[in-house]
Image (cartoon, rainbow, N blue to C red):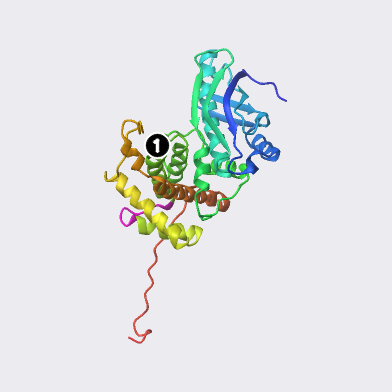
Protein backbone atom coordinates (compact mmCIF):
# COMPACT_ATOMS: atom_id res chain seq x y z
CA UNK A 1 0.00 0.00 0.00
CA UNK A 2 1.26 3.48 -0.87
CA UNK A 3 2.06 5.85 1.98
CA UNK A 4 -0.93 8.04 2.80
CA UNK A 5 -0.41 11.80 2.50
CA UNK A 6 -1.76 13.76 5.48
CA UNK A 7 -4.27 11.10 6.58
CA UNK A 8 -7.12 11.91 8.96
CA UNK A 9 -9.32 9.41 10.77
CA UNK A 10 -13.11 9.77 10.99
CA UNK A 11 -15.89 7.54 12.29
CA UNK A 12 -19.44 7.23 10.99
CA UNK A 13 -21.98 5.82 13.42
CA UNK A 14 -25.48 4.46 12.83
CA UNK A 15 -24.89 2.81 9.45
CA UNK A 16 -27.56 0.16 8.91
CA UNK A 17 -27.65 -2.56 6.27
CA UNK A 18 -31.26 -3.63 5.87
CA UNK A 19 -32.55 -7.03 4.77
CA UNK A 20 -36.25 -6.40 5.46
CA UNK A 21 -37.08 -5.81 1.80
CA UNK A 22 -34.57 -8.13 0.13
CA UNK A 23 -32.24 -10.64 1.77
CA UNK A 24 -29.78 -10.03 -1.08
CA UNK A 25 -28.79 -6.85 0.75
CA UNK A 26 -27.22 -8.63 3.71
CA UNK A 27 -25.29 -11.43 2.05
CA UNK A 28 -21.47 -11.34 2.31
CA UNK A 29 -21.14 -11.05 -1.47
CA UNK A 30 -23.11 -7.79 -1.42
CA UNK A 31 -20.84 -6.30 1.25
CA UNK A 32 -17.86 -7.39 -0.83
CA UNK A 33 -19.33 -5.60 -3.86
CA UNK A 34 -19.76 -2.36 -1.89
CA UNK A 35 -16.15 -2.62 -0.70
CA UNK A 36 -14.86 -3.29 -4.21
CA UNK A 37 -16.77 -0.34 -5.68
CA UNK A 38 -16.52 2.19 -2.85
CA UNK A 39 -13.71 0.94 -0.63
CA UNK A 40 -11.38 3.56 -2.08
CA UNK A 41 -12.78 6.62 -3.88
CA UNK A 42 -11.08 9.88 -4.83
CA UNK A 43 -13.10 13.11 -4.72
CA UNK A 44 -11.83 16.63 -5.26
CA UNK A 45 -13.15 20.14 -4.78
CA UNK A 46 -11.25 23.33 -5.44
CA UNK A 47 -7.74 22.86 -4.12
CA UNK A 48 -8.50 19.86 -1.90
CA UNK A 49 -8.37 16.23 -2.93
CA UNK A 50 -9.42 13.36 -0.68
CA UNK A 51 -8.70 9.68 -1.13
CA UNK A 52 -11.49 8.15 0.98
CA UNK A 53 -11.01 4.60 2.26
CA UNK A 54 -13.68 2.52 4.01
CA UNK A 55 -13.90 -1.17 4.86
CA UNK A 56 -17.61 -1.76 4.25
CA UNK A 57 -17.31 -5.42 5.25
CA UNK A 58 -17.33 -4.17 8.87
CA UNK A 59 -21.11 -3.65 8.57
CA UNK A 60 -23.32 -5.90 10.66
CA UNK A 61 -26.63 -6.62 8.87
CA UNK A 62 -29.67 -5.39 10.77
CA UNK A 63 -27.64 -3.58 13.45
CA UNK A 64 -26.49 0.04 13.44
CA UNK A 65 -22.73 -0.11 12.97
CA UNK A 66 -19.88 2.37 13.37
CA UNK A 67 -17.36 2.31 10.54
CA UNK A 68 -13.94 3.90 10.20
CA UNK A 69 -13.19 6.32 7.35
CA UNK A 70 -9.67 7.41 6.41
CA UNK A 71 -9.24 10.51 4.24
CA UNK A 72 -5.86 11.44 2.82
CA UNK A 73 -4.18 12.89 -0.26
CA UNK A 74 -4.42 16.65 0.31
CA UNK A 75 -0.88 18.06 0.35
CA UNK A 76 0.36 20.86 2.59
CA UNK A 77 1.14 22.77 -0.59
CA UNK A 78 -2.60 22.77 -1.38
CA UNK A 79 -3.82 23.58 2.15
CA UNK A 80 -1.22 24.40 4.80
CA UNK A 81 -3.53 24.66 7.80
CA UNK A 82 -4.28 21.23 9.28
CA UNK A 83 -7.69 22.24 10.67
CA UNK A 84 -8.85 23.72 7.36
CA UNK A 85 -7.67 20.62 5.53
CA UNK A 86 -9.60 18.37 7.94
CA UNK A 87 -12.75 20.45 7.40
CA UNK A 88 -12.35 20.05 3.64
CA UNK A 89 -11.96 16.31 4.10
CA UNK A 90 -15.22 16.23 6.08
CA UNK A 91 -17.10 18.03 3.27
CA UNK A 92 -15.81 15.53 0.73
CA UNK A 93 -16.72 12.63 3.02
CA UNK A 94 -20.26 14.09 3.22
CA UNK A 95 -20.42 13.94 -0.58
CA UNK A 96 -19.00 10.41 -0.51
CA UNK A 97 -21.67 9.19 1.95
CA UNK A 98 -24.46 10.59 -0.26
CA UNK A 99 -22.74 8.96 -3.27
CA UNK A 100 -22.66 5.52 -1.63
CA UNK A 101 -26.23 5.88 -0.35
CA UNK A 102 -27.52 6.85 -3.80
CA UNK A 103 -25.69 4.11 -5.70
CA UNK A 104 -26.58 1.37 -3.20
CA UNK A 105 -30.28 2.25 -3.14
CA UNK A 106 -30.52 2.43 -6.93
CA UNK A 107 -28.81 -0.97 -7.16
CA UNK A 108 -30.92 -2.58 -4.41
CA UNK A 109 -33.66 -0.23 -3.14
CA UNK A 110 -33.97 -0.12 0.63
CA UNK A 111 -30.62 -1.77 1.29
CA UNK A 112 -28.77 0.79 3.38
CA UNK A 113 -29.53 3.75 5.64
CA UNK A 114 -27.52 6.54 7.22
CA UNK A 115 -30.35 7.63 9.48
CA UNK A 116 -29.31 9.55 12.59
CA UNK A 117 -25.75 8.74 11.55
CA UNK A 118 -22.97 11.00 12.81
CA UNK A 119 -19.61 11.71 11.21
CA UNK A 120 -16.93 12.60 13.76
CA UNK A 121 -13.23 13.31 13.58
CA UNK A 122 -10.79 11.52 15.85
CA UNK A 123 -9.66 14.76 17.52
CA UNK A 124 -11.40 17.82 16.01
CA UNK A 125 -14.61 18.09 18.07
CA UNK A 126 -16.23 20.73 15.83
CA UNK A 127 -16.76 18.10 13.15
CA UNK A 128 -20.03 16.39 14.03
CA UNK A 129 -22.06 16.04 10.84
CA UNK A 130 -25.47 14.37 11.04
CA UNK A 131 -27.23 12.44 8.28
CA UNK A 132 -30.93 11.60 7.97
CA UNK A 133 -30.85 9.36 4.90
CA UNK A 134 -33.36 6.52 5.18
CA UNK A 135 -33.28 3.65 2.70
CA UNK A 136 -36.54 2.39 4.20
CA UNK A 137 -38.36 4.99 2.07
CA UNK A 138 -37.34 3.14 -1.11
CA UNK A 139 -38.08 -0.23 0.47
CA UNK A 140 -41.65 0.87 1.16
CA UNK A 141 -42.02 2.00 -2.46
CA UNK A 142 -41.04 -1.36 -3.90
CA UNK A 143 -43.32 -3.14 -1.42
CA UNK A 144 -46.48 -1.51 -2.85
CA UNK A 145 -49.60 -3.66 -2.52
CA UNK A 146 -50.93 -5.84 -5.33
CA UNK A 147 -48.38 -4.85 -7.94
CA UNK A 148 -45.13 -6.15 -9.39
CA UNK A 149 -45.23 -3.43 -12.03
CA UNK A 150 -42.91 -1.92 -13.00
CA UNK A 151 -40.17 -4.48 -12.47
CA UNK A 152 -37.58 -3.76 -9.78
CA UNK A 153 -34.38 -5.78 -9.85
CA UNK A 154 -31.00 -6.03 -8.10
CA UNK A 155 -28.30 -4.30 -10.13
CA UNK A 156 -24.54 -4.63 -9.74
CA UNK A 157 -23.58 -1.65 -7.58
CA UNK A 158 -20.43 -1.11 -9.65
CA UNK A 159 -22.56 -0.74 -12.81
CA UNK A 160 -24.54 1.96 -10.98
CA UNK A 161 -21.32 3.68 -9.89
CA UNK A 162 -20.00 3.69 -13.48
CA UNK A 163 -23.32 5.09 -14.73
CA UNK A 164 -23.33 7.85 -12.08
CA UNK A 165 -19.81 8.82 -13.18
CA UNK A 166 -20.94 8.98 -16.82
CA UNK A 167 -23.92 11.24 -16.07
CA UNK A 168 -21.67 13.57 -14.06
CA UNK A 169 -22.83 12.84 -10.52
CA UNK A 170 -20.14 13.72 -8.01
CA UNK A 171 -19.84 16.78 -5.81
CA UNK A 172 -22.23 18.95 -7.85
CA UNK A 173 -24.59 20.92 -5.58
CA UNK A 174 -26.95 22.46 -8.17
CA UNK A 175 -28.97 20.32 -10.59
CA UNK A 176 -28.32 21.47 -14.16
CA UNK A 177 -29.71 18.51 -16.15
CA UNK A 178 -32.93 16.51 -16.07
CA UNK A 179 -30.99 13.53 -14.73
CA UNK A 180 -29.49 15.67 -11.95
CA UNK A 181 -32.99 16.79 -10.97
CA UNK A 182 -34.19 13.19 -10.86
CA UNK A 183 -31.25 12.01 -8.72
CA UNK A 184 -31.44 14.95 -6.31
CA UNK A 185 -35.20 14.37 -5.93
CA UNK A 186 -34.48 10.69 -5.27
CA UNK A 187 -32.17 11.75 -2.43
CA UNK A 188 -34.70 14.23 -1.01
CA UNK A 189 -37.20 11.37 -0.74
CA UNK A 190 -34.92 9.67 1.79
CA UNK A 191 -35.16 12.65 4.14
CA UNK A 192 -38.96 13.04 4.14
CA UNK A 193 -40.74 13.66 7.43
CA UNK A 194 -44.30 13.70 6.07
CA UNK A 195 -44.37 10.80 3.62
CA UNK A 196 -47.57 11.65 1.74
CA UNK A 197 -46.93 15.36 1.21
CA UNK A 198 -43.16 15.22 0.69
CA UNK A 199 -43.57 12.12 -1.45
CA UNK A 200 -46.00 13.84 -3.82
CA UNK A 201 -43.60 16.75 -4.23
CA UNK A 202 -40.36 14.88 -4.88
CA UNK A 203 -41.82 11.96 -6.82
CA UNK A 204 -43.61 14.40 -9.14
CA UNK A 205 -40.41 16.35 -9.64
CA UNK A 206 -38.43 13.17 -10.33
CA UNK A 207 -41.00 11.80 -12.80
CA UNK A 208 -41.22 15.04 -14.72
CA UNK A 209 -37.43 15.17 -14.89
CA UNK A 210 -37.28 11.60 -16.15
CA UNK A 211 -40.08 11.85 -18.69
CA UNK A 212 -39.66 15.46 -19.85
CA UNK A 213 -43.37 16.09 -19.50
CA UNK A 214 -45.06 18.96 -21.36
CA UNK A 215 -46.66 21.86 -19.54
CA UNK A 216 -50.18 20.72 -20.47
CA UNK A 217 -51.96 17.34 -20.31
CA UNK A 218 -49.29 16.09 -17.93
CA UNK A 219 -51.26 13.05 -16.72
CA UNK A 220 -51.97 11.72 -20.20
CA UNK A 221 -48.47 12.40 -21.55
CA UNK A 222 -46.58 10.87 -18.66
CA UNK A 223 -48.81 7.78 -18.51
CA UNK A 224 -48.11 7.07 -22.19
CA UNK A 225 -44.37 7.66 -21.78
CA UNK A 226 -44.13 5.44 -18.71
CA UNK A 227 -45.89 2.67 -20.68
CA UNK A 228 -43.35 3.02 -23.50
CA UNK A 229 -40.52 2.24 -21.08
CA UNK A 230 -42.15 -0.29 -18.77
CA UNK A 231 -45.04 -1.77 -20.76
CA UNK A 232 -48.72 -1.20 -20.19
CA UNK A 233 -49.84 -1.80 -16.59
CA UNK A 234 -53.08 -3.48 -15.62
CA UNK A 235 -56.23 -1.38 -15.48
CA UNK A 236 -56.12 -1.35 -11.66
CA UNK A 237 -52.50 -0.15 -11.58
CA UNK A 238 -53.19 2.42 -14.29
CA UNK A 239 -56.05 3.74 -12.15
CA UNK A 240 -53.68 4.15 -9.16
CA UNK A 241 -51.17 5.99 -11.32
CA UNK A 242 -53.93 8.29 -12.53
CA UNK A 243 -54.99 8.83 -8.92
CA UNK A 244 -51.43 9.87 -8.06
CA UNK A 245 -51.67 12.72 -10.55
CA UNK A 246 -55.03 13.73 -9.13
CA UNK A 247 -53.37 13.87 -5.68
CA UNK A 248 -50.52 15.90 -7.17
CA UNK A 249 -52.93 18.38 -8.73
CA UNK A 250 -54.94 18.67 -5.51
CA UNK A 251 -51.77 19.27 -3.48
CA UNK A 252 -50.11 21.78 -5.83
CA UNK A 253 -53.31 23.78 -6.34
CA UNK A 254 -54.22 23.99 -2.67
CA UNK A 255 -57.27 21.72 -2.68
CA UNK A 256 -55.88 18.87 -0.54
CA UNK A 257 -56.85 18.54 3.11
CA UNK A 258 -53.60 18.39 5.04
CA UNK A 259 -53.00 17.54 8.71
CA UNK A 260 -51.20 19.66 11.27
CA UNK A 261 -47.53 18.61 11.58
CA UNK A 262 -48.26 17.48 15.17
CA UNK A 263 -50.66 14.69 14.08
CA UNK A 264 -52.16 14.74 17.57
CA UNK A 265 -55.40 12.71 17.73
CA UNK A 266 -55.88 13.62 21.42
CA UNK A 267 -56.27 17.29 20.55
CA UNK A 268 -58.39 16.67 17.46
CA UNK A 269 -60.17 13.34 17.18
CA UNK A 270 -61.23 14.04 13.59
CA UNK A 271 -57.77 12.74 12.66
CA UNK A 272 -59.11 9.24 13.33
CA UNK A 273 -61.45 9.72 10.36
CA UNK A 274 -58.70 11.05 8.10
CA UNK A 275 -57.66 7.93 6.17
CA UNK A 276 -54.74 8.48 3.81
CA UNK A 277 -53.80 4.80 3.29
CA UNK A 278 -55.15 4.55 -0.28
CA UNK A 279 -53.43 7.79 -1.29
CA UNK A 280 -50.16 6.66 0.30
CA UNK A 281 -50.33 3.46 -1.77
CA UNK A 282 -50.78 5.49 -4.96
CA UNK A 283 -47.82 7.71 -4.07
CA UNK A 284 -45.71 4.64 -3.29
CA UNK A 285 -46.56 3.17 -6.69
CA UNK A 286 -45.42 6.37 -8.40
CA UNK A 287 -42.21 6.15 -6.35
CA UNK A 288 -41.75 2.59 -7.58
CA UNK A 289 -41.96 3.95 -11.15
CA UNK A 290 -39.17 6.43 -10.32
CA UNK A 291 -36.90 3.66 -9.01
CA UNK A 292 -37.63 1.32 -11.93
CA UNK A 293 -37.05 4.13 -14.44
CA UNK A 294 -33.66 5.04 -12.98
CA UNK A 295 -32.74 1.34 -13.05
CA UNK A 296 -33.69 1.23 -16.74
CA UNK A 297 -31.41 4.19 -17.44
CA UNK A 298 -28.55 2.28 -15.80
CA UNK A 299 -29.31 -1.04 -17.54
CA UNK A 300 -29.54 0.61 -20.97
CA UNK A 301 -26.65 3.02 -20.36
CA UNK A 302 -28.91 6.03 -21.05
CA UNK A 303 -28.10 9.45 -19.64
CA UNK A 304 -31.73 10.52 -20.05
CA UNK A 305 -34.88 9.71 -21.99
CA UNK A 306 -35.91 11.57 -25.15
CA UNK A 307 -39.43 11.41 -26.58
CA UNK A 308 -40.32 12.50 -30.10
CA UNK A 309 -43.61 12.99 -31.90
CA UNK A 310 -43.70 12.09 -35.60
CA UNK A 311 -45.98 13.14 -38.45
CA UNK A 312 -46.42 11.10 -41.64
CA UNK A 313 -48.44 12.23 -44.62
CA UNK A 314 -49.79 10.21 -47.53
CA UNK A 315 -49.27 11.72 -51.00
CA UNK A 316 -52.55 12.67 -52.65
CA UNK A 317 -53.92 10.14 -55.12
CA UNK A 318 -52.31 7.14 -53.41
CA UNK A 319 -55.10 6.52 -50.92
CA UNK A 320 -57.97 6.63 -53.33
CA UNK A 321 -58.72 10.33 -52.83
- Residue 259 appears in the figure: no
Depicted 105 relative to depicted 89: above or below = below
Residue at the right extreme of this rendering:
1
Residue at the bottom extreme of this rendering:
320
- The prevailing secondary structure element of the residues shown in magenta is loop
- Residue 93 appears in the figure: yes
Residue 268 coordinates in the image, percent (x, y): 31, 34
* 204 drawn magenta: no
* 215 drawn magenta: yes
Residue, disc 1: 194
Residue 113 picture quarter: top right
Residue 313 picture quarter: bottom left
Q: Which residue is nearer to you in this view: 202 or 63?
A: 63
Residue 118 coordinates in the image, percent (x, y): 53, 23
Instruction: Count up the numbered dots.
Output: 1
Question: Which quadrant is home to the N terminus?
Answer: top right
Say which element carries label 1: loop
Q: Which residue is nearer to you in this view: 43 or 30?
A: 30
Question: Which quadrant is home to the C terminus?
Answer: bottom left
- Count neighbours of disc 1 (C-alpha within 10 A) and say few if under 14, some if 14 to 19, many if 20 or more: few
Residue 182 coordinates in the image, percent (x, y): 45, 44
* Residue located 71% across and 24% down the image: 2
In this image, 14 relative to 245: left or right? right
Residue 262 picture quarter: top left
Start and end of the magenta stretch?
211-218
Residue 265 coordinates in the image, percent (x, y): 35, 34
Amino acid sequence: MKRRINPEKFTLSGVCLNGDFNLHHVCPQYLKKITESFGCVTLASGNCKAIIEVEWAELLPGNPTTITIIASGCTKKSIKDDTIRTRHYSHLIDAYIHYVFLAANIASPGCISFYSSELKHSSLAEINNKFMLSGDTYGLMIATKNSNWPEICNLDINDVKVWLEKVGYGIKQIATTRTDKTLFSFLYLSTTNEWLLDGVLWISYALEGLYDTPAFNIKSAITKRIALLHGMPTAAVKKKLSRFYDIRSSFFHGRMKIPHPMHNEVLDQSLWDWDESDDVDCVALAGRVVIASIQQLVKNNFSHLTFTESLNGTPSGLDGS
